[in-house]
Image (spheres, rainbow, N blue to C red):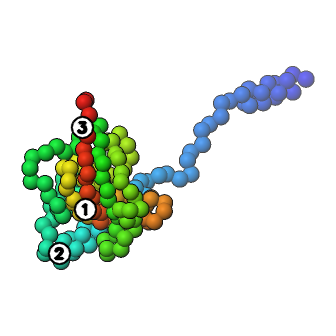
């Protein structure tokens, strides 16, 4: 009887051991991120080349490069020193959206007059940065690479994935806030 008791105790003792962690079957190498970076670099290079081609063919306008990564020219420039929009200021403006071939995506009539509170409401990155450059009464045409427009997701309506845009924007008024 004692040998059976020893065997049972030995089995119970062996079964009380803590479970061992399993080793992962796959190891993430970061290759997806590296591939995504390469894909985005190629996309940016193509879009910048297309924008540079448009600029080189348009001798009637003087294009300026913004610090934010888009290009623009003035259709109507206000020379006198007036206000520009800052954080929390209310900007009343009209704009349209076209692809870089000039095909209209949204007319200014469709979009209507917009009222936007700077940096407190959502508009696409390029438009937000472009509005900061403008004075009341100015009209500017912007060329936005896709990452400054609606990017990978588009607008889930008429603007698809990675579509660079052209936009003509007119600032009607800027109302300064007391910050």
Mark number, residue 58: 2
Q: In which quadrant of the rendered view does residue 7 lie?
A: top right
Disc nearer the start of the sequence (3/2):
2
Residue on which disc 3 sits: 176
Q: Residues within 10 Å of mark 2 (few under 14, many from 20)?
A: few
- Which of discs 3 and 1 lies nearer the camera? The answer is 3
The residue under the point 35% across, 47% down is 115
Mark 1–mark 2 Cα distance, whole angstroms, equals 13 Å
Q: Secondary structure at mark 2?
A: loop
Q: Secondary structure at mark 3?
A: loop
- Which of discs 3 and 2 lies nearer the camera? The answer is 3
Give whichever of 36, 49 is nearer the camera: 49
Q: Position of residue 93 (x, y in %)?
A: 30, 52
Disc nearer the start of the sequence (1/2):
2
Q: Is residue 42 visible?
A: no
The relative height of residue 156 versus residue 80 in the rendered view (above or below) is below
The relative height of residue 64 versus residue 84 in the rendered view (above or below) is below
Image quadrant containing the C terminus:
top left
The residue under the point 17% across, 61% down is 76
Left or right of residue 24, residue 59 in this image? left
Q: Are marks 1 and 2 in contact (CB under 8 Å)?
A: no
Q: Which residue, as the protein is rendered here, is positioned at the far right?
A: 1
Q: Position of residue 21 (x, y in %)?
A: 60, 38
Q: Which residue, as the protein is rendered here, is positioned at the far left?
A: 80
The residue under the point 55% across, 47% down is 24
Left or right of residue 89, residue 16 in this image? right
């Amino acid at each position: 009887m004692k040998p059976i008791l020893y065997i049972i105790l030995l089995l119970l003792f062996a079964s009380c051991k803590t479970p061992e962690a399993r080793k992962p079957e796959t190891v993430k190498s970061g290759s997806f991120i590296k591939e995504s970076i390469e894909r985005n670099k190629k996309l940016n290079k193509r879009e910048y080349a297309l924008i540079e081609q448009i600029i080189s063919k348009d001798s009637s306008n003087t294009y300026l490069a913004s610090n934010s990564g888009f290009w623009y020219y003035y259709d109507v420039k206000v020379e006198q020193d007036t206000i520009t929009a800052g954080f929390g200021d209310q900007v009343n403006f009209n704009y349209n959206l076209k692809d870089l071939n000039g095909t209209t995506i949204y007319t200014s009539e469709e979009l209507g007059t917009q009222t936007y509170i700077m940096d407190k409401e959502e508009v696409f990155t390029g438009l937000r940065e472009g509005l900061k450059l403008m004075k009341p009464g100015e009209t500017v045409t912007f060329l936005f690479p896709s990452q400054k427009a609606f990017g990978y997701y588009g607008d889930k309506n008429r603007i698809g994935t990675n579509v660079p845009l052209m936009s003509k924007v007119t600032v009607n008024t800027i109302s300064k806030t007391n910050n």
